[in-house]
Amino acid sequence: MRVIVDYDLCESNAICMQIAPDIFEVRDDDFLYVLEEQPADDRRAALEEAVQRCPKQAIAVEN
């Protein structure tokens, strides 16, 4: 699976980082960074929760 972020929609509110800090990080520059673009399958549940809870629907998962 692959993490896709629409940076035009992303507000860098860090909800995804709270759910999956090993995959997402909002740095001091207030931008979201994807730390693991192709996470292991055991991270699927956390990644899907991050997708669902993103208030701007800026995150997607490509299989």
Image: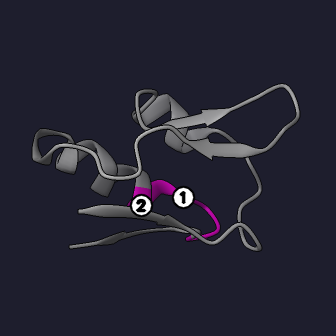
- Left or right: where 46 falls relative to 54: left
Question: In x, y percent, where is residue 13?
Answer: 71, 44
Q: Residue at x 20, y 41 (%)?
A: 43
Residue located beneath label 2 in the image = 51
Q: Residue at x 46, y 27 (%)?
A: 21
Q: Amino acid at mark 1?
A: Cys
CB within 8 Å, label 1 to label 2: yes
Q: Residues within 10 Å of mark 2 (few under 14, many from 20)?
A: many
Quarter of the figure with the C terminus: bottom left
Residue located beneath label 1 in the image = 54
Question: In x, y percent, where is residue 20?
Answer: 40, 34
Q: What colour scheme was applied to this rendering of the protein?
A: one colour
- Left or right: where 28 falls relative to 17: right
Residue 2, picture quadrant: bottom left
Report the magenta residues as a range: 51-57
From this viewpoint, which residue is outermost toward the right?
29
Q: Judge whether 26 appears above or below 56 on screen.
A: above
Quarter of the figure with the N terminus: bottom left
Asked if the stretch drawn in magenta spans residue 34, the answer is no
- Left or right: where 56 falls relative to 57: right
Tell me the element at label 1.
loop
Residue 9, picture quadrant: bottom right
